[in-house]
Image (cartoon, rainbow, N blue to C red):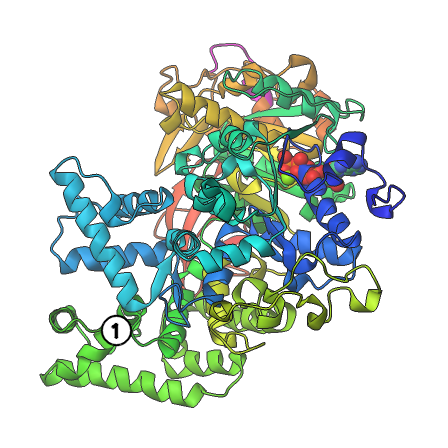
Amino acid sequence: EVAPNSPLLQNLNPEQLAAVTLPATHALILAGAGSGKTRVLTTRIAWLLQTGQVSPGGILAVTFTNKAAKEMLARLSAMLPVNVRGMWIGTFHGLCNRFLRAHYKLANLPQSFQILDTQDQLSAIKRLCKQFNVDDERFPPKQLAWFIAACKEDGQRAKDVPVRDEEGRKKVEIYALYEEQCQREGVVDFGELMLRSYELLRDNAAVREHYQRRFRHILIDEFQDTNKLQYAWIKMLAGQGPDAAQGASAMPGGSVVAVGDDDQSIYAFRGARVGNMTDFVREFDVTHQIKLERNYRSFGNILDSANELISHNSKRLGKNLRTEAGPGEPVRVYESTSDFAEAQWFVDEVKQLVRDGSARKDIALLYRSNAQSRVMETALFNAGVPYRVYGGLRFFERAEIKHALAYLRLLENPHDDTSFMRVVNFPPRGIGARSIEQLQDIARASGCSLHDGVSAVTGKAGANLGAFVAKLDVLREQTSGLTLREIIELVLQHSGLEEHYKTEKEGQDRLENLAELVNAAESFVSQEGFGRDAVAMPVDELGAGPNSTLTQSPASQGLDPATLLDEPLPELLVPDRDTGETLSPLVAFLTHAALESGDNQAQAGQDAVQLMTVHSSKGLEFDCVFIAGLEEGLFPHENSMSDQGGLEEERRLMYVAITRARKRLYLSHSQTRMLHGQTRYNLKSRFFDELPEAALKWITPRNQGFASGLGTSAGGWNGASNSGAGGGRGDWASSVFASKSGSAERFASPPVPPQRNAPSHGLKSGMEVFHAKFGEGKVLMLEGSGDDARAQINFTRHGVKWLALSVAKLTVV
Ligand code: ATP
Ligand code: MG
């Protein structure tokens, strides 16, 4: 049955081959970074399909990000001519969304239910707290959001949460009100997607049994970061749920193959349970445990660094990782005098790498917290280096985009009060806070949505609100039957958003983003066919069972749905939509906007340097990786330094960061850093002491002066004009020198003392200046001096920007 000569199976080592061709049992693959776990999962799916053991509809694969899901689908369709749409490959949220779309009635949701992202959820909670006079000092909305999310991740509805004290009682009460509000408005948050799918499976035996029969093979990547509810959901689908104990009536579910790495568990702070791995082995009676010990990603020095670092953790399941690649280049360590100098060095290094032939997309900058990206972005921007930031404020979370989406959502569902509140007076149309309060009172008293409450508001307020609702109704009518692109264009125009931003002082960027929204919709429709996550299964694909004719002839390889229908659907399970019908493009796009990061919309296709937090780099790899800001308090993060568990999680995070690099790794730290408006003096990270000396190359002299954090006076740092706060060790100068020179070899040259009193840029705050690209502006603030000088300028047309004065060409007007 196994076809060892299949091209699919070539280039696998014996352990990988064993994992790919496992029989249909439960298995755990526990292996370190870069050992081919994800590759094994993908190849196993291809192998199962190719050998006819399963049809595309019988596969359920969970990936950690949408990006990973797309990559997996792309690789599979390159390997085999399969109907990838029939395969359930995606993130937990994406898959649950798909499931709920198919069974929205059973799930007690409106057909076009909308998804609240984290921001929407927070504003929904704020609105609720206001309505019920909740003291937001005692119960900050953010904390309530965390509380609700944590309850849901624990599988608890408000009524299930144990109450210990008065405060707990109040929180649970708010949770219950929030649930009611979401239900009334027809919206679900991320946690709800998961919990509601789980409950539907738990409470509906016919649905559960159907999917248990259907998914013969369940594969899960990054298993170490699953939470309690996700694991329970998997158990349910795999027939290890409530039925399992009932003997004869038990429905045997499919095989579950989980891959993970306990050393890369980095979401404990959000409820992930490494314990799921040991539970899985016990509860599924896992007999196949496979270890992969060869790393294919990184050169020796990089891998040695990762191994040595992680060996400082005590709680480990224990595994080894070796490589057959040579040691490669040493890991470069750089110390800078300021975050600004660090950024400048980084940009110089990137430029050199690009000159030497690297593609920008193969270079990644990783940082511990999002706040670090601003200085880096400024430096890249000023140097004209294209870059892309992953995470941070997602495209779909920008205010102007949220406004546009709110109008679009109201077209679909006028009772979406979150969207209603967002745009009822945006662009401003004279509807004040008092009118809105009046409307909220009416809506609450009569238990209706804000939209429906409008007719009961009297006077001028009533007239204004009535005009807003009428405007929405007209828009709804005008857009019916239009394409997605036309709908969005019409809404941007007739909502007044476009006009508003045209007249707004800093509206240019926002207008560009709105134009980008139209592009995003366009490419969504053409490339994605409305996006896989968003589209419900046509009914004929739901019945796909294990005995498909997939391998018999290429023509029938899962492409003809009729051949997949080998089991009639119970009536109950016919999805709540007609055969083959999918969601409206608008609903599909709105879902996509809530679930996707939207990173691809920004600067799509451009060869750009990749910037992201370490958390979002999980599973990815790059030729060249920079890890910046390796300082005590930053990485390891100050919030996690007080307890052992927190510190070990930081160390795993550092392990993830190091193991992203294929060929070249840079680690940098800075003596000073501006954070939250203050200059901080930081010690270098303890992680440096946990790396093998032999693998490192210090490209700035070690232990240079300026003992950071040891009480040096704040005035000690002044960029190039520093006059030896370094305790007389004399090598301070070289680091300043190094921070501004060109290539790697430069560090061999003897240090040249920095110029004292570098020429002043002659700017003062309040001055009017002109910049070739940004036009006219006014200087708000100046920082640093000499080469490190930077200015914050408020440009008339482009808003407030930080510019490096050594690079930016400014003229005083
Ligand atoms: P992570 O823990 O970071 O998610 P992983 O274990 O999932 O890593 P993969 O991303 O699957 O590892 O593989 C790492 C790299 O090694 C990939 O570029 C992959 O193509 C390559 N690789 C894996 N196995 C082999 C092999 N047998 N031969 C050649 N290259 C391989
Ligand atoms: Mg992986």
With 408 as the anchor, is 547 left or right in this view? right
- As drawn, which residue projects farthest toward the front? 248
Q: Residue at x 43, y 33 (%)?
A: 268
The answer to whether any part of residue 607 appears in the image is no
Q: Which span is picked out in magenta? A: 726-734
In which quadrant of the rendered image does the N terminus lie?
top right
Tell me if mark 1 has few (under 14), some (14-19) or many (20+) residues whose alpha carbon lies within 10 angstroms of its own: some
Q: Is residue 728 magenta?
A: yes
Pinpoint residue 15: horizontal percent, then vertical percent: 76, 30
Seen in the picture, residue 621 relative to 443 is either above or below; the reply is: above
Pinpoint residue 736: horizontal percent, then vertical percent: 56, 26
Seen in the picture, residue 130 relative to 494 is either above or below; the reply is: above
Pinpoint residue 42: horizontal percent, then vertical percent: 70, 47
Give the quarter of the image for residue 343: top right
- As drawn, which residue projects farthest toward the right? 5
Question: Relative to the observer, which residue lies in front, 676 or 592?
Answer: 592
Question: Relative to the observer, which residue lies in front, 426 or 57?
Answer: 57
In which quadrant of the rendered image does the C terminus lie?
bottom left
| Rendering quadrant holding ligand 1 | top right
Would you say the beta carbon of the disc 1 residue lies within 8 angstroms of ligand 2?
Answer: no
With 532 as the anchor, is 708 left or right in this view? left
Seen in the picture, residue 574 relative to 194 is either above or below; the reply is: below
Pinpoint residue 322: horizontal percent, then vertical percent: 73, 22
Give the quarter of the image for residue 3: top right
Give the quarter of the image for residue 287: top right
Q: Residue at x 90, y 43 (%)?
A: 5
- As drawn, which residue projects farthest toward the top? 728
Q: Main secondary structure of the magenta part?
A: loop
Residue that carries the numbered disc 1 in the rendered image: 425
Q: Is residue 471 magenta?
A: no
The answer to whether any part of residue 96 appears in the image is yes
